[in-house]
Amino acid sequence: MAEAAVHYVLGKIAETAYKEALFLYGVGDEVEWAKRELEWVSAFVKDADAKQNKGALVKKWVEEVKEVAYMIEDALDEFFVKMGGARSKGVLKRVSHGPKALIERHKLGTAIDKIKERLNEIKENRENYGITSLPSSSGGPARQFVRPVFTPEIDETEVVGFEDDIKNICEQLCDESVSRRSVISIVGPGGRGKTTVASKIHKSFREKSHFDCCIWVTVSQGFNVIDIMKKILEKLHKTAKEVGDEEYFIPEVYASLRQKKYLIVLDDVWSSNDWTLLERAFPEDHNGSRLLITTRSKDVAEKSDGANKPYELRTLNEDESQQLLLKKTFPSQFASKCPDNILPVINQFSEKCYGWPLALVVLGGILSMKDPVHWDGLLSKVDWKECLDIISTSYEDLPFDLKLCFMYLAVFPEDYQIKASNLIQLWIAEGLIFHDDQSTKTMEDIAESYLEEIAQRCMIQVSMRSWSGRIKYCYIHDILRELAIRKAKENNFLFLCSESDADSISRTSTSTRRIAFYNYNDRNLIELVGGSLRSLIIFGKYLVRSKSNHELTMIRVLNIDVRTEELYQNFKWLDQLIALRYFQCTGNFGPLPISFWNNKMLRHVKMLSNNPLFPSVLMGPPSSANLENLLTLKGVVTSDEWGVKLPHFPCIRKLGIIIDGKIDGEALVNSMSKLEHLYSLHVAGHIKRKYYFILDLRNYKKLHSLYLSLSVCELGIGFNLLPPNLVKLTLDSSQLEEDPMPELEKLSNLRVLRLLEWSYEGERLVFSKGGFKCLQQLKLEGLRNLVELKIEKGGMPNLNQLEISHCPEVNVVPDFQYLTNLRELNLQYMSNDFWSSLEGVDQHKILHLPSKIFNWKLPSGRSFFPRFQQYRRFYRKNKALESVVVT
């Protein structure tokens, strides 16, 4: 992916602090030269990337372009490091005229001369290899890839695990109460079984007389509307002229389908634009006609018919996976009992496919060619690449910048819940987000749109969304993670080192840009090769340390997640990381050196402690220099020095501070008042009585999220002192004695309210009529003294999610029937009397709710409602009800 490497280096050169420092050091001409050369190369790399599979020479040219791009980066970075990085303008000007600057400029000139020689060779070879100029692919989906023709045949007997889905879709297609032309979508990534399900449905209707005509058309990635229209006309036994444009063929199909009750299956629709064009061919005669589409894109599904919820196919469970694999492995013998000695091996193989039907079918085809006696040594030798090749078409359709972002997901361990905000920050710090100077969007906005698009393409799974609909947590399915790892290795994008291949660290090359460690258990120091490393990510039991810190100098990202009680105190080497953008540390660590705060490139600093006995959050105070790029600062144990130096972070948006007993509250409040861009504030800890102070937040116009994890009386904060535009409020251990709702309900913009463990010590909470007009999510957890929760009619009119847990004294069910917009009700760990009331006299309070999910968690040892059968009729009749989860 030469295009990605070139644009990555171009983006780095354009960074303000980096570019400014290099110009003041007197190498502005070299920077401009590098920019011009890379822009020239970028005009050709897209064509080269597309052609590299057609010949070794073109592939070699692509690798040379990547190498030269990184040579330019290394040369400029080496100079940047030797000169001391980004510092104040006064220091930069003084240093740039010293003897050291002359020596380093000479070295840079020598390096540039060598790069020019390599570039001349690249330019000559370009013409010889037939590489032409093409527009950059950064603006939209790549279309140069062709979907593989190979699709394993799955006959009816091999459809496993989707019986209920098929039945439900068939019933929806036959629903006589819906006369309009409706569209039903089956959504999922490649290999999930969409085509299989649609094929069986299509076949079943072809054998019936419910529709006048049943037509199957494969749309696929190489979309051609004329070819699709021709296929439909052919299956309608209509003759059409061979030559014509879409304005001829679409009306022809439309006229041929008029007054017919039709079922059209459109398999593999890739984009909403494709659907918009196709839709014109299908008339609306209000006769019960239907369209069934399969797609990898949720966007296509949602735009095709907003009234019908898409069917998202799940992966197969363990039994279903084993059953499908057996059917494909022994197609002629499956009717008979499978030998017992084979089942354990089959189970091991099926686990490798993670429940993906297509991968199971491919594997079954491989096993069917082998005698079972030879399977023992096959598990480690199976070419899993073949399974991934089929699924990887979703990856090939990505623009190059989304390919980079997808490959980056390989840094996270298996089954890791990825916090979206962290992922976005990492993408930006790594230089993977390309920002147009003319764009009004921030890099965070662009990165968030990338994440949403990857989710729409079903290449990540969304675990949780925020009240506003933004992705909050996500994860990557195991088989897609394998794909990300494979692509990252192919493109030398990322080097992975785990417990199972600890020796592989010695195989890192001088061009390795990123290294991720998983559960690396070697306490010994490692030898990182070369100074090319830009990212070091560690998940494990021990801190991976380098024998020489020189290799770490140009690191942009340092993410340490070490789950151990061992205390690491020596962080002095951090002051050498003068290019660091992102620093997150989870574990038990000593204070950061004061010199750490001299780095003007810092964007995000987060220290998170595993063990309160060893606070990893201790930090030295910042220097006198302003860190204008710093946006996030979490884990600060406040001191008087910190109190006066917070204004050195003028652009800070997210701040998390811990108050340790004593603090000059007035100085802290004055400092915080200067943080004009503060969006999120988390205050935790405790304050000794003589240090109590008033935290007045009324002038914080941009503060949208507030988390208070300490006694509110210690802050002297009244709820009339809260920010006027507050959207999210969390109270934890606040020890409130009076009902705070009369004041809180006046916050006109509040969308999320959470009262957590011991935040309220009173016995009664009242949500009054007309209060909390905008509140959408409410969580009450660990309110041990709460006896009565009163919800008045007209209170919280827009609440859609309610969770109540660990409130053992609440015995009477609140008036949930007044919450007319509630979609999710989550009740956990309530008293036995509460459950008895809910199944008895207060049953009517939930039967009238248009809720989609009821999640009950009972006290240990208690069985579920004895009269649960009474609810069945309600569940069947309630159209809004999506599922019932009993845990």
Image (cartoon, rainbow, N blue to C red):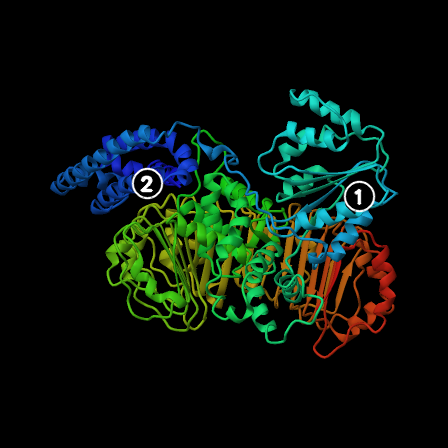
Quadrant in which the N terminus appears: top left
Mark 1 residue element: helix
Label number found at residue 206: 1
Residue farthest left in this picture? 99
Task: Give the residue type at disc 2.
Answer: Lys
Label number found at residue 60: 2
Q: Residue at x 62, y 43 (%)?
A: 297
Q: Looking at the picture, tell me which residue is in the foreground, 648 or 285.
A: 285
Residue 219 visible (yes or no): yes
Q: Residue at x 50, y 66 (%)?
A: 379
Residue farthest bottom in this picture? 861
Q: Position of residue 877 (x, y in %)?
A: 86, 55
Q: Quadrant of residue 228?
A: top right
Q: Residue at x 15, y 37 (%)?
A: 97
Q: Position of residue 7 (x, y in %)?
A: 38, 37
Q: Is residue 272 left or right of residue 511?
A: right
Q: Give the Cα distance between marks 1 and 2.
A: 52 Å
Q: Quadrant of residue 640?
A: bottom left
Q: Position of residue 481 (x, y in %)?
A: 50, 55
Q: Position of residue 549 (x, y in %)?
A: 25, 58
Q: Marks 2 and 1: in contact by CB < 8 Å?
A: no
Task: Give the residue type at disc 1.
Answer: Arg
Crowding near pointer 2: few (<14 within 10 Å), some, many (20+)? Answer: few
Q: Looking at the picture, tell me which residue is in the foreground, 395 or 215.
A: 215
